[in-house]
Amino acid sequence: MPTYDYQCEKCEKVFEIFQSMNDKKLTKCPNNSCGGKVQRLLGVGAGVIFKGSGFYETDYRSESYKAGAKADKKKSSDKKKKSKNKKSTKKSD
Ligand SMILES: [Zn+2]
């Protein structure tokens, strides 16, 4: 049976509910003293994690990607130079 994660809009508590595809969607907080509206979360806890660190992670990733592309460019040009030097060294030997 699949597990669905719901989060209450009122108390912000996340509930893990076991239910089949045919079961009714949970709409109310299982906490009787709350009774707030609940929303189904897509993916297990992904929304919560994304909210907290998504911005920094994206920033870091794009920065490292840029650095990686730069290093790659440098590497390939270095390789070209190196192989040229190697050839000439071999010839003189
Ligand atoms: Zn609630």
Image: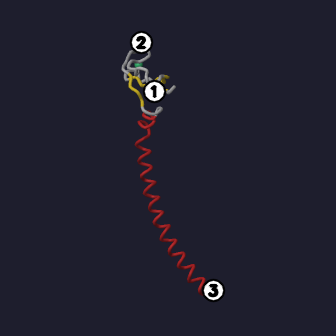
Local SS, label 2: loop
Residue 86 on image: x %, y %: 57, 79
| Among the two numbered marks 1 and 3 on one chain, the one whose residue lies closer to the N terminus | 1
Image quadrant of ligand 1 equals: top left
State the separation of the CA atoms marked 3 and 2.
88 Å
Q: Residues within 10 Å of mark 2 (few under 14, many from 20)?
A: few
Label count reads 3
- N-terminal of the pair, mark 3 or mark 2, is 2
Q: Which colour style is shown?
A: secondary structure
Q: Are marks 3 and 2 in contact (CB under 8 Å)?
A: no
Q: Residue furthest right?
A: 93
The residue depicted at 40 percent of the width and 20 percent of the height is 24
Residue type at mark 1? Asp
Q: Position of residue 44 (x, y in %)?
A: 48, 32
Q: Nearer the viewer, mark 1 or mark 2?
A: 1
Dot 1: few (<14), some (14–19), or many (≥20) neighbours within 10 Å? some
Could you give the CA–CA distance between mark 1 and mark 2, rounded to whole angstroms?
20 Å
Residue under label 1, please give it. Answer: 5
Q: Is residue 10 above or below residue 88?
A: above
Instruction: Of the two numbered discs 1 and 2 on the same chain, state the one appearing first in sequence.
Output: 1
Label drawn at residue 25: none
Query: In front here: 62 or 87?
Result: 87
Q: Residues within 10 Å of mark 3 (few under 14, many from 20)?
A: few
> Which three-letter amino acid code belongs to the residue tagged 3?
Asp
Residue kind at label 2, given as amino acid type: Ser
| Residue underneath mark 3 | 93
x, y (%) of residue 71? 48, 63
Q: Which residue is mark 2?
A: 33
Say if 93 sits above or below 60 in the image. Answer: below
From the top left corner, tell me how far across and down residue 58 is, in percent. Answer: 42, 46
